[in-house]
Amino acid sequence: MSFYHSVMSKKFQRRSLFRKKPSFRSRYSYLLRLLLAVVALLLTLYAAIFLLPVIPNVTNIPADSKALPKESASYKVKILPQSGLSTISRQLVDQGIETYPIVFQIAARAIFVGTSLKPGTYLLPLNASLGNVILQIARGDRIRESIAIIPGMTIWQLRAVIDAHPALIHQTKGMSNKQLLQSLNLNYPSDEGIFFPDTYIFDPDDSDLFIYRRAAQAMQKQLNAAWELRDIKTPLKTPYELLILASIIEKETGRSSDRPLVASVFINRLNINMPLQTDPTVIYGIGPRFDGNLRKTDLRKDTPYNTYMRKGLPPTPIAMPSKESLRAAVQPAQSNALYFVSRGDGTSQFSKSLSEHENAVDRYQRKQVALSRKTTQ
């Protein structure tokens, strides 16, 4: 090693040996400044998320819509089902939210709800901030609509209700009954009776097929459950026959407690090959043009639904039966009754013989008619 290198090496060692180490106070000061910078950055980030508006100050709901005053001061957006965070961010930007997809994603993760955003239709306040929009979507605070299928409703009544609902997209409007069944991938002789009565909640702008599909699936579930409870001696051969009988029970009962006895009358008649002789099937055969007055000529007109002239069950259900009517059809009361007549108060009088039945008709119907005529004279 040269003399020069030797001298320089010694100087370097002395310099390194006596170099002043940073004090604890200076290290603390550095960390404090770093922490303050991080806090300032976070405060700026969250201030931007919760203070800067991203919703336009003008609603996108058409002026001629049926919006309520609150809705007309909102901005409407829709998030499709099964959408992830990046997809949701693009959907909202495409619908007019004034931000960038990457900014939306960063903000959602910054407030720890990136995996909690829910699909649906939302009414967002005008001039709302990005943070408020994200939190509302994370809460699932969205618009919900509903439609009710009433027990005893016929298919033409149901289709009229669904066709008239303003929040649905009407894909089935104008379809024939056969086309509706094909759209639902169902193999039934008719679309009557196959939709379970219930209240169905949905998002605005859902398809009406969504309602029909859910109602059909619900009915199939209830039908299968009822069929499992059947007596091995029942004259009903298939679940579809159960559905037909349940629909008749539904239309014949004014009080739920009478269902098992009404069911027993029809089961007893089927067992002895006696005509069911029930007015609701004849009325169904007349169709929507029925004016509320069942005439003798109607009872004498031979149609597939005239159970006075034809034995056995009609070819299809005649209405949407409830769960209670399905259960009554497979678990009828134990009785020998073959007849029943309305008492006029929603209940029925049951009889074992024709003579008993005639007396009950005299008591509860013919005398009531005579009394009403006398009071109107």
Image (spheres, rainbow, N blue to C red):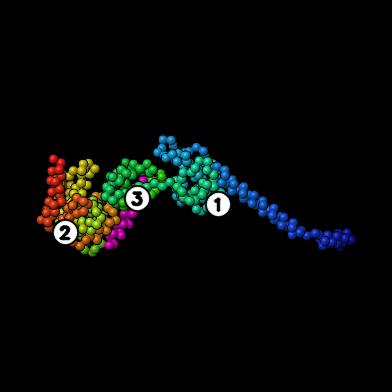
**Tag 2, which secondary structure?**
loop
Above or below — where is 308 with respect to 66?
Answer: below
Q: Residue furthest left?
A: 355
Q: Residues within 10 Å of mark 3 (few under 14, many from 20)?
A: few
Q: Position of residue 363 (x, y in %)?
A: 13, 52
- Which one is earlier in the sequence, the residue at label 2 or at label 1? 1
Q: Residues within 10 Å of mark 2 (few under 14, many from 20)?
A: many
| Quarter of the rendering containing residue 169 | top left
| Quarter of the rendering containing residue 68 | top left
Which residues make up the magenta segment? 208-229
The residue type indicated by label 1 comes to Ile
Q: CA distance from mark 3 to mark 2?
A: 35 Å
Residue 150 inside the magenta-drawn segment = no
Q: Position of residue 244 (x, y in %)?
A: 24, 53
Residue at image point 22% right, 56% down: 258
Frontmost residue, 355 versus 18: 355
Residue at image point 25% right, 62% down: 230
Q: Position of residue 261 (x, y in %)?
A: 21, 58
The residue under label 2 is 337
- Which one is earlier in the sequence, the residue at label 3 or at label 1? 1
Q: Is residue 11 left or right of residue 252?
A: right
User: What count of labels does the image hold?
Assistant: 3
The residue under label 3 is 199
Q: Residue furthest right?
A: 3
Q: CA distance from mark 2 to mark 1?
A: 69 Å
Q: CA distance from mark 3 to mark 1?
A: 36 Å
The residue under label 1 is 111
